[in-house]
């Protein structure tokens, strides 16, 4: 059994697969390095994004990725495309309205994940069984949302910085308009929506810094009218500039 250190790291094996890991005792890893992970009976290689205070480690970093490990990773990427071609053939056979957007194979090829978009819930049990038999490994077929798709594509937000979902968020939680109102933001969908068309992720994690007293009555928490701006109302954006 591998002894673990008390430090936790956020490691990205794929844009849609970020895991909290702990390093084996004696293993010193840094942001920007590639490490070999072991979890749930499989091994993969991931990019260290940095330390995290999340206590729920789901994998162990057993070593830094050596040249031969990176070579295996490259081979796994090539095998992904072969597996994807087989998957698409079976998809056409079962006539499922599924848009496959990406695929990720673990470096040991014991597991592979197919990510897709669809407007409906699909029954793909027969497809899952057939592709599993054909590839001879564990298969995950996962439906993702539009926000996950934005994370996969990447880009810049209205602030000019990389998308929060791409840069550092580990999970995408639901956000309501009430959060925007609580922050005294003008509720214009075009102004407070991200590249995915959903409300900006930063509305949620920035919400914690706003004082709760602003919720005491409707008058204080309502969205200001245009005349309020003329009378000297100061937004948080203006105060920060």
Image: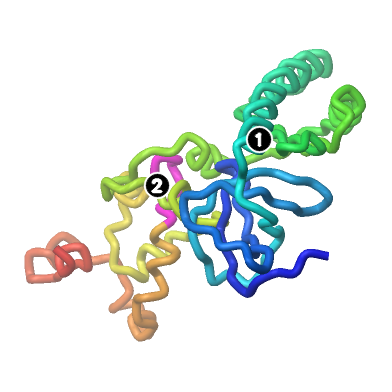
In this rendering, the count of numbered labels is 2
Q: Position of residue 224 (x, y in %)?
A: 23, 66
| Label 2: how many Cα within 10 Å (few below 14, some 14–19, many 20+) | many
Residue behind mark 2 = 163
| Residue closer to the observer: 110 or 62 | 62
Label 1 or label 2, whichever lies nearer to me, is: 1
Element type at mark 1: helix
Side of 127 relative to 164 (left or right):
right
- Does residue 121 lie above or below 57 as drawn? above
**What's the magenta region?**
194-201
- Does residue 159 lie above or below 139 as drawn? below
In the rendered image, residue 200 lying in the magenta stretch gets the answer yes
Q: Position of residue 213 (x, y in %)?
A: 35, 86
Q: Position of residue 49 (x, y in %)?
A: 49, 54
Contact (Cβ within 8 Å) of mark 1 with mark 2: no
Q: How is the image coloured?
A: rainbow
The residue drawn where x is 66% and y is 57% is 61
Residue behind mark 1 = 68
In the rendered image, residue 10 lying in the magenta stretch gets the answer no
The residue drawn where x is 69% and y is 44% is 44
């Amino acid at each position: 059994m591998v002894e673990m250190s008390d430090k936790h790291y956020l490691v990205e094996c794929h844009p849609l697969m970020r895991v909290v890991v702990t390093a084996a005792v004696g293993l010193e890893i840094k942001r920007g390095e590639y490490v070999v992970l072991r979890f749930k009976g499989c091994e993969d290689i991931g990019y260290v994004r940095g330390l995290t205070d999340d206590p729920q480690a789901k994998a162990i970093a057993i070593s830094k990725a050596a040249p031969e490990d990176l070579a295996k990773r490259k081979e796994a990427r090539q095998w992904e495309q072969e597996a994807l071609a087989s998957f698409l053939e079976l998809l056409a056979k079962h006539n499922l309205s599924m848009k496959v957007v990406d695929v990720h194979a673990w470096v040991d090829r014991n597991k592979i994940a197919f990510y897709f978009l669809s407007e409906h819930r699909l029954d793909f049990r027969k497809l899952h069984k057939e592709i599993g038999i054909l590839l001879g490994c564990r298969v995950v077929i996962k439906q993702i949302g539009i926000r996950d798709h934005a994370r996969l594509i990447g880009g810049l937000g209205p602030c000019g910085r990389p998308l929060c979902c791409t840069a550092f968020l580990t999970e995408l939680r639901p956000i309501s308009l009430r959060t925007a109102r609580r922050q005294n933001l003008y509720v214009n969908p075009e102004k407070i929506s991200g590249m995915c068309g959903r409300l900006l992720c930063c509305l949620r994690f920035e919400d914690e810094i706003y004082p709760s007293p602003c919720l005491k009555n409707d008058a204080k928490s309502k969205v200001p009218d245009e005349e309020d701006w003329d009378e000297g109302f100061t937004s948080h954006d203006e105060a920060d500039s």
